[in-house]
Amino acid sequence: MKRTLIFGGARSGKSAYAEQLALSSGKPVLYLATANGGDAEMQARIAHHQQRRPAEWETLECSINLAQAILAASRPDNLILVDCLTLWLSNLLFAEAAEYPEVGRIQAPAQFVQQRAAFLQALETLPGELIMVSNEVGMGIIPQGAISRWFVDEAGRLNQAVAARCEQVSWVAAGLPLHLKGA
């Protein structure tokens, strides 16, 4: 088993680098897409990613139950590519259609707590290879609004927890990977 985290900013080249790694593995690839095409802009982003992927890769859309999907699909002879963890985090945050205050403490939805814990546990037991893509959203100005700050904090915590469980971690900027852990 090999677990890899690739993270970076928006349009940094992290997905393309993850796809390159998956392709070079020589293994059958299952692409787990976490994005929801809720508006035209997101639909265009999804279409761009779809056009770039090799036709032989299987794609499974998985917006919430990521642990269940990777546990069901992981085998010693395949590779799963998850793109991306921060979209999954956003899906979890808004899955219960809760109203969040502009100011004050945000209580994590129960589904978020359960799914995050299940995902981190699944990372410990997968028999196959896994590459995960995530955004780094905490390098700029602290956002205004409680829900935005909560999201930045939780994305950072998720990236740290995933990186701790991975054998390889790479940061991508301007399409260039910087290997932080493993080689």
Image (cartoon, rainbow, N blue to C red):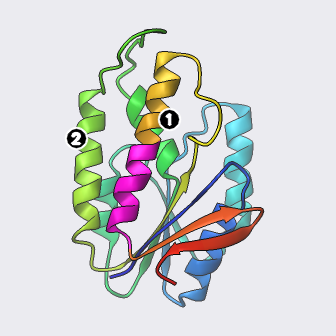
**Crowdedness of circle 2 by 10 Å Cα count: few (<14), some, many (20+)?**
few
Most foreground residue, 5 or 99: 5
Q: Residue furthest bottom?
A: 26
Most foreground residue, 30 or 87: 87
| Number of the label disc, if any, that sits on residue 152 | 1
Q: Is residue 139 above or below residue 107?
A: below
Q: Nearer the viewer, mark 2 or mark 1?
A: 1
**Crowdedness of circle 1 by 10 Å Cα count: few (<14), some, many (20+)?**
some
Instruction: Please tell me which residue is depicted at 40% across the width and 30% down the height of the picture.
Output: 93
Q: Are marks 2 and 1 in contact (CB under 8 Å)?
A: no
Q: Is residue 57 above or below residue 112?
A: below
Q: Quadrant of the N terminus?
A: bottom left
Instruction: Determine the secondary structure under disc 1.
Output: helix
The image position of residue 87, as x and y in percent, is: 52, 43
Magenta segment, which residues?
156-166
When asked about the image quadrant of residue 77, the answer is: bottom left
Instruction: Please tell me which residue is depicted at 43% across the width and 28% down the height of the picture.
Output: 150
Residue receiving disc 2: 114
Say which amino acid is labelled 2.
Gln
When asked about the image quadrant of residue 67, the answer is: bottom left
The image position of residue 88, as x and y in percent, is: 45, 44
Instruction: Please tell me which residue is depicted at 63% across the width and 71% down the height of the picture.
Output: 178
Say which amino acid is labelled 1.
Val
| Number of the label disc, if any, that sits on residue 51 | none
The image position of residue 99, as x and y in percent, is: 41, 11
Magenta span dominant secondary structure: helix
Disc nearer the start of the sequence (2/1): 2
CA distance separating discs 2 and 1 = 19 Å
Left/right of residue 159 with respect to residue 35 in the rendered view: left
Instruction: Determine the secondary structure under disc 2.
Output: helix
The image position of residue 157, as x and y in percent, is: 39, 45
Residue 157 falls within the magenta-colored stretch: yes
